[in-house]
Structures are given as C-alpha cells and as structure tokens.
Image (tube, grey):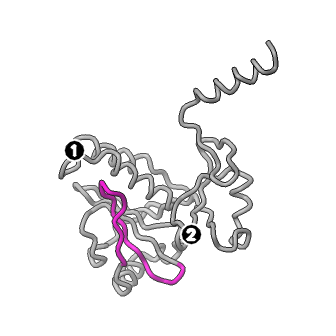
Amino acid sequence: MTSGALARVIRSAADRRTEVERCDLCGVDVPSDHRHLLDMGDEKVLCACRPCSLLFVKEAASEGRYRLVPLRRVRLPPVGTRGLGVPVGLAFFVRHTDGTVSAHYPSPAGAMRWEADPEAWREVVAACPPLAGLEPEVEALLVNTARSADHHWIAPIDDCFRMVALVRTLWRGLSGGSQVWPAIDRFFAELTEQP
C-alpha cells in the first residue's frame, strides 16, 4: 500500500469515529474523563486536554479569561431555597466574583436566569455553611425538589450545564413528556460525591 493510500485509509477511519471530543483550545482528542474550563467572556464550558487544563489551573495564565472547573461534588442536607424565588423545583445557583448570585433553571429553550435576592442568599448560606465555600463562577448549588425529589449538591458548573442540555433535548409538550423526568432522575442518581 502506498503512503497516500494508507493516509486515505487512516483519514477515512478517523472520519467514521463517532462523537470524538476535542480540546476547545488546541484541538487534540480528549478522553471521556477530560477536564473543563469556563470561558468567562462567553460564559460557556470548554473541553480541555490535560496540558491545557494544567496551564489554566492558575488564573493568571489566561489573564482571568478561563477558569478551571473543579471536580468537587458534595451532597448536602436539604437546603431551603424558597426565599430565593425559584419558580420550579429544578435549579442551580452560581456565586459570582462580584458577590452576586444568579439563579438558573432549565427549560426547553435553555437555562433561564435571574439574580437571586442577596439577603435571601445570605440566609441560605447561614443555614448551610458549606455553601460559603462555593468557588465563584465554576461551582453551584444544584437543587432538584421537583416531583417529590430531594437532591441538594455543591456541583461543578459543567454538571449543571449537562442537566440543562438534558432538559433542553428531551422536553416535550407542557409537562416535559415521558422521557425527561426519568432522565433527570438518572442524572441525579448517577451523581457521586467527589471531594
């Protein structure tokens, strides 16, 4: 086989690969357990290979543009979020570097967002002190009390975005349809604590 024919076979095999994820910074293939960076400018999560994720462990490397999303997941006791004005039982709350807190809930159109009342957030943190240690921008309080569920987590922001994508992809009709709620139950059942 000539080198040109071999190259075509290799390219053809590479083209047939399904759902290969690549580092959004340098373009190399990444394994399924790769890390993520939050692009602070676009507020989107980027896939990162190991070298790129190591490069951005220190915020100074990107002049504040990218933040490494932590792996920490902590199951919390029930957290009273009623005072935060959440219109649904499935939501996440992100503390920002300026001290504000934004609340998000998934919808068929993506994540809906509003600013949480600062006093109400202080009351939630006083009742659940581990929330005081949320990493700004990249960790969230993730809550599911919909349909008699009772899940409260400190979770990386990429978990929250995965949950939003799940709802956006599977939601049908006014109530969500038959697929979305079992998928949300599986999503929360598969969360594991990660110190």
Classify residue 7 as left or right of residue 145: right
**Residue ranking furthest to the left:** 174
Task: Give the quadrant of residue 59.
Answer: bottom right
Residue 75 image point, x, y percent: 44, 60
Whether residue 166 sits left or right of residue 85 in the image: it is right
Q: Which quarter of the figure has residue 36? A: bottom right
> SS at mark 1?
helix
| Residues tagged 1 and 2 counted as in contact (Cβ below 8 A) | no
Badge 2: residue crowd in 10 Å (few <14, some 14–19, many ≥20): some
The question of residue 12 being in magenta is answered with no
Q: How many numbered marks does the figure carry?
A: 2
Magenta span: predominant SS is strand
Quarter of the figure with the C terminus: bottom right
- Residue 2: give x, y in percent of width and height: 81, 15
The magenta span reads: 97-115
Q: Position of residue 146 (x, y in %)?
A: 25, 58
Residue at figure coordinates x 46%, y 64% from the top left: 154
Name the element at disc 2. loop
Residue where numbered disc 2 is placed: 40
Q: Residue furthest right?
A: 3
Closer to the chain start, of discs 1 and 2, is 2
151 versus 18 height, above or below: below
Residue at screen point 65% across, 43% down? 30
Task: Residue 33: give x, y in percent of width and height.
Answer: 60, 45
Please name whichever residue, 63 or 154, is drawn nearer the observer in this view of the structure: 63
Residue at 35% of width from left, 46% of height from top?
A: 169
* Amino acid at circle 1: Gly
Q: Name the kind of residue labelled 2 in the image.
A: Met
Q: Which residue is the extreme one toward the top?
A: 1
